[in-house]
Image: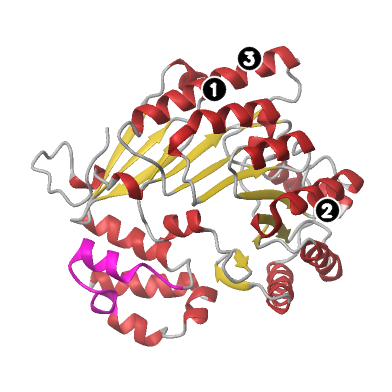
């Protein structure tokens, strides 16, 4: 069911926050499969590496069928999406045939001149998969390298590395050019500043248009957390900060703009899809564990999610719906918007909340006037913003 974003609802069970302009919606599709789960990963994902080829193909094909059917239902009247992002898990685990079928099934929903991103892991992003992405309309490939150092990859519980990693990264760079995005991680056990700089230098040698640069977070319940509990040494907090700042400096020297907390881009190569998240524009998520948020012209919203269970999603997806009142949407708009160096969209903010950002948090903006300062000290800036809203 497609809703219109600037209509007022009189039905309390259907707030205007569930309404959106059909041409303005972005689409996220979650592919919860991978070959092996990395030790640091706490996302919902299902390792298929030990399944027989026949069983693996059966699971993948049933899941793709369910995703396409649910996407068609959710976007029945939408001519096309503003952007499409296929994430995971690891969509490269679908293989060439799977990604080809998924992209073909999206059909006219694919934006003809817009951004279409697919995530991939080097371990499974073979030439056939990359070619299928390129032929299927993918404009941007996000490759989860994390590190080019074999010891760092082993510390993360990642297989691969060596010649295959370099060759597949080079193949992706050749096919997608500036449409390539690379993930690089800092704070890995045993990582030195010299090793991190080697990783960044290697990443820059492929001239990707975009680099996501993350500090490792040890999530409770993961194999990495258990290894740390058994004595695996991590960099101290100060050392981890120094590593990340050293990497940031190297990326900026390389010509990359630090435009979001963990994202850097060459001019004109910011992630359009992710900017729509950060600016709280409307998107739907489809797939086991996926969620999406749509906000109406009155500042109320509706979030629709799916439980993280691929089997249940294949059997018949069940939506979990959360209605968002205006104060909640306002805080989320600031929380997400100021991750992005440009901040929330001023016109959209005023339309939804009936006042400008400057009218909502004037003292906080005066105190934190520099955009880069706000980005580097985001938590303190947001704390001040929320305290001012509550006064």
- Neighbour class for label 1 at 10 Å: few (<14), some, many (≥20)? many
Identity of the residue drawn at 75% across and 34% down:
128
Q: Secondary structure at mark 3?
A: helix
Q: Which residue is mark 3?
A: 58
Please say if the residues under marks 3 and 2 sit with CB atoms less than 8 Å apart.
no
- Depth order, front residue of 294/189: 294
- Seen from the viewer's position, the closer of residues 230 and 39 is 39
- Percent position (x, y) of residue 290? 46, 37
Where is residue 170? Give x, y as percent: 81, 52
Dominant SS of magenta comes to helix
* Mark 3 surroundings within 10 Å by alpha-carbon count, few (fewer than 14), some (14 through 19), many (20 or more): few
Q: Please determine whether, in this image, residue 76 is positioned above or below residue 186.
A: above
The Cα atoms of the two marked residues, 1 and 3, are separated by: 9 Å
**How many marks on residues?**
3
- Does the magenta segment cover residue 347? yes
Query: Residue 81 occupies which quadrant of the picture?
Result: top left
In the image, what residue occupies the spot 73% across and 71% down? 247
Helix, strand or loop under label 2: helix
Marked residue nearer the N-terminal end (1 or 2)? 1
Q: Which residue is mark 2?
A: 152
Q: Is residue 288 visible?
A: no
Q: Which residues are magenta?
A: 342-361
Q: Which residue is mark 1?
A: 63
Eyeballing the image, is 54 above or below 244?
above
Of the two numbered discs 1 and 3 on the same chain, state the one appearing first in sequence.
3
Q: Point out the tag, 3 or 2, that comes first from the N-terminus.
A: 3
Residue at x 71%, y 57% (from the top left corner)? 177
CA distance separating discs 1 and 2: 33 Å
Evaluate whether residue 81 shows in this view.
Answer: yes
Q: Which residue sits furthest left?
A: 10
Relative to 299, is 100 on the left or the right? right
Q: Is residue 117 above or below residue 234?
A: above
């Amino acid at each position: 069911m497609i809703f219109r974003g600037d209509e007022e609802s009189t039905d309390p069970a259907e707030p205007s926050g569930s309404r959106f302009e059909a041409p303005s919606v972005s689409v996220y599709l979650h592919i919860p499969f991978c070959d092996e789960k990395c030790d640091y990963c706490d996302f919902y994902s299902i390792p298929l590496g030990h399944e027989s080829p026949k069983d693996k193909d059966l699971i993948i094909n049933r899941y793709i069928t369910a995703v396409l059917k649910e996407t068609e239902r959710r976007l029945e009247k939408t001519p096309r999406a503003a952007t499409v992002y296929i994430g995971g898990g690891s969509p490269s685990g679908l293989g060439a045939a799977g990604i080809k079928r998924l992209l073909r099934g999206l059909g006219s929903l694919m934006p003809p001149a817009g951004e279409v991103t697919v995530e991939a892991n080097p371990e499974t992003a073979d030439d056939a998969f990359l070619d299928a992405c390129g032929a299927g309309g993918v404009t941007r490939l996000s490759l989860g390298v994390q590190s080019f150092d074999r010891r760092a990859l082993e510390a993360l519980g990642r297989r691969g590395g060596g010649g295959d990693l370099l060759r597949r990264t080079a193949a992706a760079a050749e096919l997608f050019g500036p449409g390539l995005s690379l993930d690089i991680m800092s704070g890995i056990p045993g990582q030195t500043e010299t090793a991190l700089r080697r990783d960044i230098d290697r990443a820059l040698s492929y001239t990707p248009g975009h680099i996501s640069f993350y500090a490792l977070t040890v999530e409770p319940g993961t194999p990495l957390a258990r290894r740390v509990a058994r004595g695996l040494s991590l960099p101290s907090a100060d050392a981890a900060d120094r590593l990340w700042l050293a990497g940031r400096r190297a990326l900026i020297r390389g010509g990359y703009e630090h435009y979001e907390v963990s994202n850097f881009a060459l001019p004109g190569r910011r992630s359009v899809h992710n900017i729509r998240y950060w600016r709280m524009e409307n998107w739907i998520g489809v797939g086991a564990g996926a969620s999406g948020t749509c906000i109406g012209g009155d500042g109320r919203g509706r979030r629709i999610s799916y439980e993280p269970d691929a089997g249940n999603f294949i059997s018949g997806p069940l939506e979990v719906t959360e209605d968002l009142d205006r104060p909640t949407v306002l805080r989320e708009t600031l929380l997400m918007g100021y991750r992005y160096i440009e901040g929330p969209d001023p016109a959209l903010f005023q339309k939804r909340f009936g006042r400008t950002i400057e009218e909502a948090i004037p003292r906080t903006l005066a105190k934190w006037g520099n955009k880069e300062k706000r980005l580097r000290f985001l938590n303190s800036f947001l704390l001040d913003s929320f305290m001012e809203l509550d006064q």
